[in-house]
Image: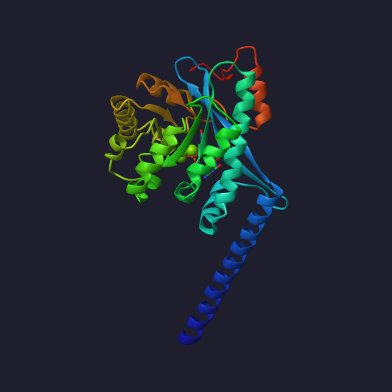
Amino acid sequence: QAKQEGKDSYIVFQSAMHTQAVALLELENDLRRAIERQEFQLYYQPIIDLNTHQIRSFEALVRWFHPERGLVPPSDFIPLAEDTGLIIPMGYGLLREACQQLQQWQQLAPAPLSVCVNIASRQFAHADFVNYLQQILTEIPLPPGSLKLEITEGVIMKRPDLVADKLAQLKDLGVQLSVDDFGTGYSSLSYLQTFPVDTLKVDRSFVMKMGHPDSREIVKTIVTLAHNLGLDVVAEGVETQAQAQLLKAMGCEYAQGYHFARPMEPDAVLSLLGTKDQRSVPHPAL
Ligand code: C2E
Ligand code: MG
Ligand code: MG
Ligand code: MG
């Protein structure tokens, strides 16, 4: 009896694995097709200067409009795109798209504007990454400093030996560098001294819990650390006015989150940039 049950649950387990494997394969096929058919679109979320309330930058966030499944969030396909290597062609396309978009906006909005593009680990590690970026920037010249790449601590710490060289080459291209999800990765901070990083993005998980003194203290420490090292700080995931006020009081200059604006289509950005109160997001007072 026991043996039979064991056998049954083994079969159940095996068939669940099989279902999962098939689903994954299907998603991989869909992903390949999606790249060919350009089913991806970048949305853009404003990054706000907490003192002037003006838009300083936009983070480009990919959206996949799947013909049958509808909107698939990045967390459901970026990991698979990394595992399969599809992140390389996909990431290149998105990088070019973001640069083109920024160039268009800069022609419309005279004040300096930048765009932040997320770079996956495998994409950053790709041998042709710097060459390709250089090609894009030759084709689409942008003012120095107006393209920012967001990488996580994990990307930096994976191969610190290779990374130093790569980051230096990127800086030579006039690209700025942000450490995304700061505080969630590695405990070592020494890389901040070694590598030419410009900005720290405080992870949403700390901002979310800022009602608690411990999280507030962590955010404050990150803000102070950044400033002492001469870096900018952006707080991610600001959802309430209370959070915005606390951040401002701590001296954090930049914030991003639903309190100000959600990621939006390029057209919505255009109308935002075109409003009379140019380049500031309509939102409840800080
Ligand atoms: P991330 O780079 O840390 O991006 C911030 C995420 O927080 C975005 O989720 C954004 O929509 C969300 N967010 C912004 N404000 C708020 C808020 O106030 N509350 C809450 N709850 N969430 C907020 P999204 O767009 O789903 O992207 C998730 C992650 O997927 C990104 O995290 C990034 O790691 C990755 N990703 C997104 N687009 C790309 C891309 O084009 N390339 C690569 N390689 N990765 C991307
Ligand atoms: Mg990011
Ligand atoms: Mg982030
Ligand atoms: Mg995050």
Q: Position of residue 263 (x, y in %)?
A: 59, 33
Looking at the picture, does residue 110 appear above or below residue 157? above
Q: Residue furthest top?
A: 276
Looking at the picture, does residue 6 appear above or below residue 104? below
Query: Residue at position x 55%, y 78% from top?
Result: 11
Q: Would residue 184 be visible to someone looking at this image?
A: no
Taking the image as shown, residue 26 lies to the left or right of residue 239, namely right
Q: Position of residue 228 (x, y in %)?
A: 28, 25
Taking the image as shown, residue 61 lies to the left or right of residue 249, namely right
Asked whether 92 or 179 is in front, the reply is 92
Taking the image as shown, residue 49 lies to the left or right of residue 68, namely left
Q: Position of residue 155 (x, y in %)?
A: 40, 46
Q: Position of residue 274 (x, y in %)?
A: 66, 17
Taking the image as shown, residue 205 lies to the left or right of residue 265, namely left
Query: Residue at position x 65%, y 32% from top?
Result: 265
Number of labels in the image equals: 0
Q: How is the image coloured?
A: rainbow
Looking at the picture, does residue 245 appear above or below residue 151? above
Q: Would residue 149 be visible to someone looking at this image?
A: yes
Asked whether 53 or 211 is in front, the reply is 53
Asked whether 41 or 131 is in front, the reply is 131
